[in-house]
Amino acid sequence: MGSLVTSTPPAKSAHPRRGGRRPVFGGIDLGTNNCRMLLGTPAPDGFHVLDSFSRVVRLGEGLYETGRLSPVAMDRAIASLRICAERAQRWAEGLGAGAGGVRLRAIATEACRQAENGAEFIAAARAATGLPLEIINAREEAELAVESCAPLIGKAVRRALLFDIGGGSTEIAWVRVQPGEAPVLIGYLSLPIGVVTLSERCATSCYSPAGFSRLVDDIAAMLRPFEAVHRIGEEIRRGGVQMLGTSGTVTTLAGVSLKLDRYRRGLVDGVALNRQAVDAALAEARALGRDGLSRHPCIGAERVDFVLPGCAIFAAIHELWQVPELIVADRGLREGMLMRLIRATPHIHRRSYHA
């Protein structure tokens, strides 16, 4: 089973000369809440991280009310995309003319899919940054999440149920697993709710027991048609089904469960939490309240408003599909893009890029 081989990035991006003439790949993910970039070079068991970037841009701020991306939100996103473009350009310049530069893909997701002016923003961002930014559909978003998490799928697994709780949407992927082959997407569901949209709609109600329970029930009702089609509960009872979660919500809950004094990716990515540990983490997050969550070392004031809305989405998934344990993944669309780009490039060693 493969794994991501990563180096810890320094506070500033690594010097381009470290790339030498190795091919360098990049993935930029512009979501409803965050702008993220990852640059890496192939390694036998995945890739080495050369540079990474993440910034809260709140692109979807106010989208639920207006149906449009606001000028200030678009400006924030473009400013972060410029940083990504500049850092990728520094690597390209350091590679030498014969190295082919940085092979990069840049995607936008739910906020741009929903917004009336999403295509207008994409055109403006391309013109301002030179990045090949494109809006992807929900199916490809689910596929990229599966791609990134494939190395965490166990060898004895028949099926995998993966969820990605984003800022503006939640993707559910139902996956067939066969030994020696890449996982195959059987079905997917994209719910038009995420931590940003829920925080704007019902942030205060999440903090009351009754309000939280109503929200969980409403979300579970949105999941049941997918369950009726794929009979996932029946497959879980037969055994051999693994659940994987990739989102800030589940990595935060893992940090709470592990009692971390600060968030550490190496301790969270790939950790297995049984149902008792998950239930305890959910209960602790709800008991902390807004003030306690803002002081928690794995959360902080910038993310506090998104924690309980994300917990409500996760609680609905957790209650409807009762698998014995959850595999927590601190990886996402950026890693999926890099793996695809690497695999699609001739003459690159491809061992262990999927489970």
Image (spheres, rainbow, N blue to C red):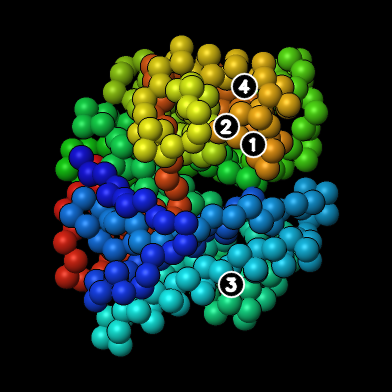
Q: Earlier in the sequence, mark 4 or mark 2?
A: 4
Q: CA distance from mark 4 to mark 1?
A: 13 Å
Bin the neighbour count of mark 2 within 10 Å (Cα to Cα): few under 14, some 14-19, many 20 and up.
some
Bin the neighbour count of mark 3 within 10 Å (Cα to Cα): few under 14, some 14-19, many 20 and up.
some
Q: Secondary structure at mark 2?
A: loop
Residue picked out by circle 2? 297
Q: Earlier in the sequence, mark 3 or mark 1?
A: 3
The single residue placed furthest to the bottom in the displayed view is: 97
Q: Check whether the beta carbons of the residues at disc 3 and disc 1 lie within 8 A of each other.
A: no
Res. 236 image quadrant: top left
Q: Which marked residue is nearer to the observer: mark 3 or mark 1?
A: 1
Instruction: Give the side of residue 293 with respect to residue 182, left or right.
Output: right
Residue plotted at (38% across, 82% down):
93
Q: CA distance from mark 1 to mark 2?
A: 6 Å
Residue picked out by circle 1? 300
- Residue 60 image position (x, y, % from top left): 71, 53
Q: Can residue 144 be seen from the camera position used here?
A: yes
Rendered view: 251 above or below 284: below
Q: CA distance from mark 2 to mark 3?
A: 30 Å
Residue plotted at (68% across, 70% down):
121
Q: Check whether the beta carbons of the residues at disc 4 and disc 1 lie within 8 A of each other.
A: no
Residue picked out by circle 4? 285
Q: Can residue 310 be seen from the camera position used here?
A: no
Residue 326 vs residue 136, the one in the foreground: 326
